[in-house]
Image (cartoon, grey):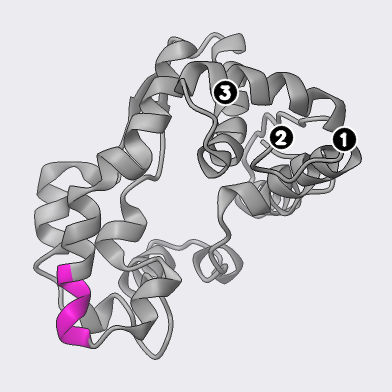
Amino acid sequence: VGLPDSKDIKWTRHAADMLGLNLNLKIIQPDDLDAYLQKTIYVLEESDPLKAVIGLPIYAACEFIKDNGIHVAFAGQGADEIFGGYAKYLNLEPNMINDALYHDVKNLYHTNLERDNMIAMANSIDLRLPYLYPKLVRFAFSIPATLKIFHGERKYILRKAALELGLPRDIALRSKKAIQYSTGVKKHVEKIAKKKGYTLSKY
């Protein structure tokens, strides 16, 4: 899912070509953003700008999945929280990283999962979260923090596992991009708001 010129669309095509996978893309046109924004805010029952621009591409993806007759979807939520994927962890001492990760896992429902679950349910999608399988979470917290962030590389052990499993380096080592940026949604919604004389928050 993404705007026509977005990084996610380009990278997904590239990854599918490398892996020989069939690919179904949902291209969001700039003219569709207003309608998606309204749908997303209606489902979330609040107009927090960050939740809205993150939720919009998730809404578009869930709608697309439903339109293709699929009712169960997998999402990668939790990987950043158990394997050290966020930039904020880079500034922590190794002995503090797992405590910070644990705090973020405990609060994951309020920060991300509630939003995603509401959007999935609104589209009749059963959202599955493999990275939050309890055995995997427990295992992840038994791994030293120095294997999660190694020489400034986040999710180090997860990337190493991906390479061991045979994923191309382009995919396994790709830098993390937040969904609101990689899909192009935030940039284009801000453009719409600016044209109408609003900041993103006011819009």
Q: Quarter-wise, where is residue 93 in the image?
A: bottom left
Sequence-earlier tag: 2 or 1? 1
Quadrant placement of the N terminus = top right
- Residue 54, placed above or below residue 96: above
Provide the secondary structure element on which disc 3 rests: helix
**Residue at 84% across, 48% down:** 5
Q: Position of residue 154 (x, y in %)?
A: 40, 74
**Residue at 86% across, 26% down:** 31
Q: Position of residue 167 (x, y in %)?
A: 49, 61
Q: Examine the structure image and report whether residue 98 is included in the region drawn in magenta.
A: yes
- Residue 139, placed above or below residue 12: below
- Type of amino acid at the residue the image marks with label 1: Lys
Q: Which residue is mark 1?
A: 196
Q: Which residue is mark 2?
A: 203
Sequence-earlier tag: 3 or 1? 3
Sequence-earlier tag: 2 or 3? 3
Distance of label 3 from label 1 (alpha carbons): 20 Å
Residue count near mark 2 (Cα–Cα under 10 Å), binned few <14, some 14–19, many ≥20: some
Q: Which residue is mark 3?
A: 40
- Type of amino acid at the residue the image marks with label 2: Tyr
- Write down the region rendered in magenta: 94-99
Provide the secondary structure element on which disc 2 rests: loop
Quadrant placement of the C terminus = top right
- Residue 170, placed above or below residue 33: below
